[in-house]
């Protein structure tokens, strides 16, 4: 009798594991695809990578989002063409932004897990704070290459308005996800 009870439990664990792996791989693929939507801008292109990373945190939670982003960065740094513009390796000007993806994904997920998903305003503020981590990391690295004034002028200023709009859309999407997820449970 006991072995009969263990089989369904084992199958359930395997099913959950496969579901987890599938979620991570699909999210990783989507992140790599979204990164290819890029508008050339020098030295930092306008991409949807940063908002996609924040959205991963908002929707998947801290652990899954960090796993997806870590896999993505390992793919890119190993030379696979997953970064914006089909680049791989260690991008010169955008390296700092990429490094900021990990703490941003964690932060967005961690805050959502602790209640930021309850309201659109807190979700949006979470998205803004998480994106700020990416931009701070990016500009901090960029200033070593071009100086502070230029780093801020080309690494933050041109993106502020559109980034806030993208983050609002990401917040609306994730709120819809959390509301439907709450209704299912």
Image (cartoon, helix red, strand yellow):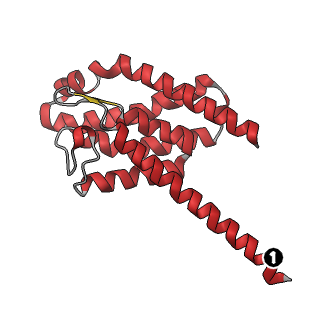
**Nearer to us in this view, 133 or 26:** 26
Report the residue that reaches farthest toward the right: 1
Residue 113 horizontal/vertical position (percent): 62, 43
**Residue 116 visible:** no
**Nearer to us in this view, 16 or 129:** 16
- The answer to whether residue 33 is left or right of residue 89 is right
Which residue lies at the image location 35% right of the left edge and 44% below the top edge? 32
Q: Which residue is mark 1?
A: 5
**Residue 76 visible:** yes
Residue 94, image quadrant: top left
Which residue lies at the image location 42% right of the left edge and 49% below the top edge? 28
Circle 1: element type: helix
Residue 20 horizontal/vertical position (percent): 56, 57
Q: Quadrant of the N terminus?
A: bottom right
**Nearer to us in this view, 107 or 12:** 12
Which residue lies at the image location 16% right of the left edge and 38% below the top edge? 144
Q: Please determine whether, in this image, residue 102 is positioned above or below residue 170.
A: below
* Local crowd size for mark 1, using a 10 Å CA cut-off: few (<14), some (14–19), many (≥20): few
**Nearer to us in this view, 181 or 64:** 181
């Amino acid at each position: 009798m006991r072995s009969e009870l263990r089989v369904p439990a084992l199958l359930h664990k395997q099913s959950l594991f496969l579901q987890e792996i599938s979620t991570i791989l699909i999210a990783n693929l989507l992140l790599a695809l979204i990164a290819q939507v890029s508008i050339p801008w020098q030295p930092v292109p306008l991409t949807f990578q940063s908002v996609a990373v924040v959205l991963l945190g908002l929707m998947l939670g801290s652990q899954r989002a960090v796993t997806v982003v870590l896999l993505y960065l390992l793919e890119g740094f190993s030379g696979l063409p997953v970064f914006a513009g089909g680049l791989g390796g260690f991008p010169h000007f955008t390296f700092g932004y990429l490094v900021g993806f990990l703490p941003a994904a964690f932060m967005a997920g961690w805050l959502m897990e602790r209640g930021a998903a309850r309201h659109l305003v807190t979700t949006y503020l979470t998205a803004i704070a998480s994106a700020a981590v990416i931009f701070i990391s990016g500009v901090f690295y960029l200033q070593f290459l071009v100086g502070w004034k230029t780093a801020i002028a080309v690494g933050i200023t041109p993106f502020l308005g559109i980034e806030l709009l993208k983050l609002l859309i990401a917040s609306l999407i994730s709120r819809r996800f959390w509301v439907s997820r709450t209704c299912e449970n």
